[in-house]
Image: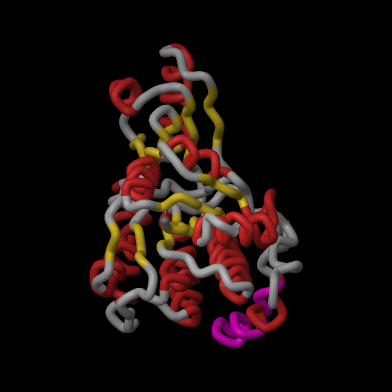
Amino acid sequence: MKILLTFPGQGPQRPGMLQQLPDGEALLAQASDVLGEQVGDLDSVEALKHTRAVQLCLLIAGVAHARDLQAKGLEPDMTCGLSIGAFPAAVVAGALSFDAALRLVALRGELMEQAYPEGYGLTAIVGLTQRELEPLLVEGSWIANLNAERQLVIAGSEAAMQAVAERAMAAGAQKVHRLAVSVPSHCALLAEPASKLADAFSNVTLNRPRYAYLSGSSGRVLWQPEQIADDLAYNMSRTVRWHEAMIAANERDVQLAIEMPPGAVLTGLTRQAFTSGETLSLEQGGSDLALTLAKRLRDPRS
């Protein structure tokens, strides 16, 4: 039976999220040295209005909490991240160095924000299936995330998303919610920025991961460095298939999924995909509970 660490995408970020990280002082000093700036300031209210800062905060927080669990004796078998969460997942899996991830994520955020500085984003739609939502799309909108069977996300312009949201509610959707994301991620609008990020990957060396790296875009486990580089570079323009990925994890004998802070959204989504096993938000349950569940999984007699 296996353990999966999951890493969230944009949305759950909040001011001050870098201030109480395990071993945070050393990690923030390393990040500041790599990027040539005071990284500890990226979690201010003003800074978090920008995509680059949000994505760097999520990378740093994910790596900090995962490494803390590892230092306490919890070794995962698999990692998976949603959107930007794929980068800390790759770092923890051993495929990408933390320093390289910092530089790539900084560039990723800049490219995404420069491409669509305003007027675009993401909207969650709850209560409709993909088959029910697709006919409701209008020009300038795309299905971006298949998070659960009836929890989808659309990307596009504000006007297009509003039109689809109104159609969705009329068609029986339970809820529509404009997400705290300022770019139209996971659709064709980001094909050009993704291509530029892929060029940057040509100067980065990736390794065969120590733990299985599960793609949140394809639902496949990737071991080859070139495949992981492609997945990381282009995931901003590819549909998120979280539901499929979590089904694949469960089918590969993952029986415990632990979500790295911040937030607990992935825990709920993963629970919907699992037919057996346990899911835990580290932020809500704490490291002691995570370690207890992991020990029980590894040694049922304990």
Lateral position of residue 186 relative to residue 105, left or right: left
Could you tell me what secondary structure mostly forms the magenta stretch? helix
User: Which quadrant is home to the N terminus?
Assistant: bottom left
Q: Name the spot of residue 39 as percent of width and height, x first.
A: 65, 75
**Residue 17 seen in the current view:** yes
**Taking 204 as reference, is 258 left or right?**
right
Picture coordinates of residue 294, whole percent (x, y): 55, 59
Of residues 231 and 123, the one drawn nearer to the viewer in this rendering:
231
Identify the residue at image location x=45%, y=12%: 170
Please name whichever residue, 151 or 71, is drawn nearer the observer in this view of the structure: 71
Residue 93 in which image quadrant: bottom left
Q: Is residue 38 magenta?
A: yes
How is the rendered protein coloured?
A: secondary structure
Q: How many marks?
A: 0
Is 100 situated above or below 183? Answer: below
Q: Residue furthest front?
A: 301
- Residue range in magenta is 29-40
Taking the magenta stretch, the answer to whether it contains residue 12 is: no
The picture quadrant where one finds residue 160 is top left
Q: Residue furthest bottom?
A: 33
Q: Nearer the viewer, residue 48 or 294?
A: 294
Identify the residue at image location x=42%, y=58%. Answer: 2
Q: Is residue 257 above or below residue 57?
A: above
- Residue 209 sits above or below residue 45 on the image: below
Q: Image quarter for residue 149? A: top left
Residue 219, percent across and down? 30, 50
- Residue in view at x 47 percent, y 65 percent: 76
Q: Is residue 24 above or below residue 58?
A: below
Q: Residue at x 75, y 68 (%)?
A: 19
Look at the image and tell me in which quarter the C terminus lies.
bottom right
Kindly tell me whether residue 189 is visible in this rendering: no
